Image: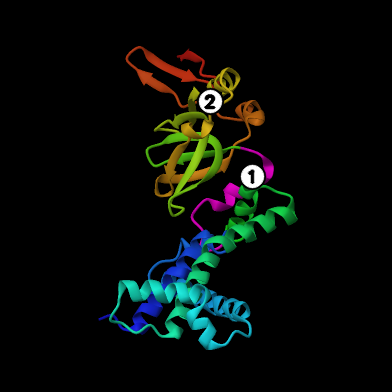
Amino acid sequence: MIKPTIFFVLITTIIGYVFCYRCHLINPRFIKSTGYHTFLHSAIWGFAGILLSAFIFWLMKGETNAEELYTTGLNGLLKTALNSIFPQIYVPIYLLHCIQIIAIAFALAFFLPSIILFLACLISGKNKGFVRAKAFEKIADSDESPEFSTVYYKSWEFGLPVAFTLSNRKVYIGYIVGSAGHLNDVLVLPLKSGYRCEKEQRLELVTNYEPVWNDISDNNKQVELSKFLICLPIREVIHANLHDFKYKDVFKKHEKPRAVEQNKHGSYSIDGNGNVSKRG
């Protein structure tokens, strides 16, 4: 038979887990925690929820005496239900109180984060996405945040897309719209994609997505671009930087020509614009 203390710890931890997972102020750090850190976060917030629920229950109980509490209202309903299910078991009044306090704690764990988020949006005048992002920004420069979270907020601050270079030299340039899973992946709406050449690691753009997104938006207002997001695993990203297309031509003026390519017909040089000229 399960000991009451184990049952209490289990219930408290579950309540704390639900609250931590749903609360935008705690969620960024909580989902990055592992092992006993996750358990401690859940237990602490769950115990705080139980105490708050007990206080709320005490306020609701008021001056009603124990005999009336035992036979009337919700207590009476719970007692009748438990006696019907377990007719051989005596149901003490403290058990009825514990059930109600736990029910209040679960309700708080589920609804209180939504209330906090609503108040934050109301006070700041921003939408839910902005408020959640600001909550995550506070750990962007800490060891608890995933890689490249700093450039995420720089992109947000300057309104610029980010160029992600993957381990296979594939490059995606686009806007970060969120994180997936446990912040191990990043969701990107691509604007352009390409690769870095093997010899000089120059960026070669191959696909332009912007005209496609514009056509989709113009032809069908109901289509959500979120279905075209690309999920990039953080572990595969070896470099990320802000990318401003306005300065592309300016940088090209100061790029060195590509290295000389040799084949059986002679030597050829390729300039920054891709023009080929024979040498020698």
For the N terminus, the quadrant is: bottom left
Q: Nearer the viewer, residue 161 or 224?
A: 224
The image shows residue 253, relative to residue 111, as above or below, that is above
Quadrant in the rendering for residue 134: bottom right
Q: Nearer the viewer, residue 167 or 9?
A: 9
Q: Residue at x 51, y 15 (%)?
A: 275
* Residue 268, image x, y percentages: 44, 17
- Tell me the tag on residue 156: 1
The residue tagged with tag 1: helix, strand or loop? helix
- Tell me the tag on residue 257: 2
* Residue 186, image x, y percentages: 48, 45
Q: Residue at x 57, y 17 (%)?
A: 219
- Residue 143 visible in image: no
Category of crowding for the residue at label 1, using alpha-carbon neighbours closer than 10 angstroms: few (below 14), some (14–19), many (at least 20): some
Q: Nearer the viewer, residue 118 or 75?
A: 75
The image shows residue 229, relative to residue 79, as above or below, that is above
Specify how the rendered protein is coloured.
Answer: rainbow
The residue tagged with tag 2: helix, strand or loop? loop
For the C terminus, the quadrant is: top left
* Residue 228, image x, y percentages: 47, 31
Quadrant in the rendering for residue 170: top left
- Residue 209 visible in image: yes
Q: Residue at x 44, y 46 (%)?
A: 238
Amino acid on which disc 2 is placed: Pro
Please give left or right for residue 29 compared with residue 9 in the image: right
- Give the distance between the C-alpha atoms of the residues marked 1 and 2, in whole angstroms: 34 Å
Please give left or right for residue 82 compared with residue 249 in the image: left
